[in-house]
Amino acid sequence: MAENQVKLTKLAKCAGCGAKVGAGVLSQLLEGIRVHQDSNLLVGFDKSDDASVYKISDDLALVQTVDFFPPIADDPYLFGQIAATNALSDVYAMGGEPKLCLNIMAVPDSMPKEAVHEMLRGGYDKVYEAGALITGGHSILDDEPKYGLAVTGFVHPDRVLTNSGARPGDVLLFTKPLGIGVLTTAAKADMASREAIEMAQELMTTLNKSARDIMVNYRVHACTDVTGFGMLGHACEMAQGSGVEIELRTDAVDFIPEAAELAKIGILPEGMYRNRAFAESAVDAGDTPLWKQDLLYDPQTAGGLLMSVDPADAEELLGELKDAVPSAQRIGEVREYRGGKHIFLR
């Protein structure tokens, strides 16, 4: 980066998915809004899912989502890649294939045009890697830069994956390590190593395409991508939406080592506290150390897919996932709901 080039993260109050409105606040904002019924609307905003799904024919449904946020990287091209990766992920989480995308962009009037160009180029390159197209978009002037995509994808109506289909006995698989929010927070304060920052950047620019392409060949009953609400926020939505309990085996969860060390000394993103406030009442933490709890609430940007899988398919699916996504993990099980808490950490 040139010495006179603007550092994008210095222009943002919050970074990446850590800028999301908290899940608890969001539910309050949506409360009381009338939901119109349409027999072809298979998934709407009333279900706290990753995207909406609308049936076009017996063989085709549209998956639609939108996602954008302030810079999580100083390099404009990298930021564009991360924002696009994150926006595309919601379609993959529904079992769909992204097809058409629209840019959503806000930029300060003083932002160099070269930086804007690079941000857009980063988004374009990642979208094309996904096999989709950018066909236009909308931009406004704003003091704080923001970038993302509205994404439309395709899925068969009978093969839609939601976050509310988990069944007792299912096995939980997850495809990326946790700790991205902690690392990006530490990076803004120059407290993260170059190696850890590069690892976080690689994770945030890795599409969930390979994981999606594999999982649709197995009996996956529910899926969600773990992003701004953290593992426990998204797992809570899955458990409550499915009417089940989830047991997470914290020793099986892949925590980024440097993120764990930073969490132990209290280097945590603001979004972690919002996620804890939202989900903590539904979580039995047992004797789980506080730093592990913090990382389970840590907001992820372009995080992995959390899958609830038929136990007969779990080992074969995990083996195939590991060939394409080495960080894939078996992290827990789904149980019948017995009343009380929905998430149990063990």
Image: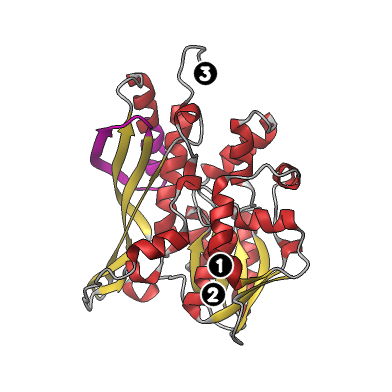
| 279 is higher (above) or lower (below) than 107 | below
**How far apart, in angstroms, are the residues tagged by discs 3 and 2?**
44 Å
- Residue at horizontal 43 percent and vertical 52 percent from the top: 21
Region rendered in magenta = 121-145
Camera sees residue 220: no
- Residue at horizontal 67 percent and vertical 71 percent from the top: 332
> In the image, residue 48 lies at what x, y percent?
41, 67
- Horizontal relation, residue 75 to residue 336: left or right: left
Q: Secondary structure at mark 2?
A: helix
Identify the residue under disc 1: 235
Residue type at mark 2?
Ala
Identify the residue under disc 3: 1
- Horizontal relation, residue 34 to residue 163: left or right: left
Q: Is residue 136 magenta?
A: yes
Residue type at mark 3?
Met
Identify the residue under disc 2: 239
> Which of disc 2 and disc 3 is earlier in sequence?
3
- Horizontal relation, residue 113 to residue 315: left or right: left
| 78 is higher (above) or lower (below) than 316 | above
